[in-house]
Image: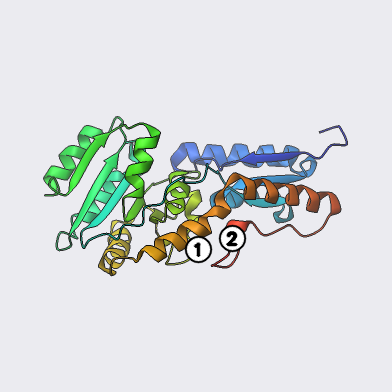
Amino acid sequence: MRSPALVGIMAEPGIGIGLKGSIRRLNARLEGFRIASKVNFVLSIGHLGHDWYRLAGYPSCKLFPYGYFVEGASVVPTKTRGKVRRLIFIGQLVRRKGVDLLLEALSGLRDLDFELVIVGDGVSRGHYENLSTKLGLSRAVKFIGSAPNREALQTLAEMDVLVLPSRWDGWGAVVNEALMRGVRVVCSSKCGAADLIRSPSHGAVFQSGSILALRTVLRRIMADEPRPDLAREALSSWARCLEGEYAARYLLDVVDSVRRQQPGPTPPWMAPWPAA
């Protein structure tokens, strides 16, 4: 920081839940008081990151939206789906990921035809399997455990909707993976990757922690007519803006705008839909 070089930070927000969250916010404010004036820019991960670092004392002019980025999808299926809506969750089976909220929400939608595939493992798996049985969902919900990345992504590509019901997620790169494969996403407002849900064609965002809000969104999406192949292809085409090439170009534009003391660029994933 004592050199003439630009100094930038790329960071997620802290987890601001409970007493530990209050302590983290206090520590962030103390750190911001110490270094915010010496930092030239912050690549804040998602809207949660922007809010976190703004409250920590970094001026808005130094905050630039950023995210996580993955390789592009090599194959996008074009086979039209049937009437049964296929949902998928991919991630750790821990409380923070909110699978219990998803199961509770689906228990009120048994009048609809759906299947839920849960990919992943964790300390809460047994609890979620028992909860699924208790809620009368055992026929509609399939736990397949951990899977190799390629296998998990192929399964994702065959689905209608990815659901990420996290109580808190700094980003959630599986949202990128789904959009790149033309799969709509339902995610909570406490996922940084909610920034990518730019239109109903992308999916929907619900209030984190609300079973009723999640159930309402899922009912609306599952009541839709099966999406035509062209709609999946259009979403996959737009999601190219999430590839590393676009993110790197945006990063260079951020650095250039900071050097020139000019307004920052618009991230390609936040441009008006359709953008790419």
Mark 2 crowdedness (10 Å alpha carbons): few <14, some 14-19, many ≥20? some
Q: Secondary structure at mark 1?
A: loop
Quadrant assignment for the C terminus: bottom right
* Amino acid of disc 2: Met
Q: Nearer the viewer, residue 8 or 229?
A: 229
Marks 2 and 1 sit apart, C-alpha to C-alpha, by 7 Å
Instruction: Quadrant for residue 94, please give it.
Output: top left
Tell whether 3 sits left or right of 86: right
From the top left corner, tell me how far across and down residue 214 is, in percent.
Answer: 32, 58
**Dot 1 corresponds to which residue?**
198
**Mark 2 element type:** helix
Give 196 or 240, whichever is nearer the viewer: 240
Q: Is residue 13 above or below residue 241?
A: above
Image side of residue 67 versus residue 217, left or right? right
User: Residue 34: percent from the left, percent from the top?
Assistant: 74, 37
Q: Earlier in the sequence, mark 2 or mark 1?
A: 1
Residues 152 and 134: in front is 152
**Label 1 environment density (alpha carbons within 10 Å; few <14, some 14–19, many ≥20):** some
- Which residue lies under the disc numbered 2? 270
| Residue under the image location 61 percent in, 51 percent down | 50
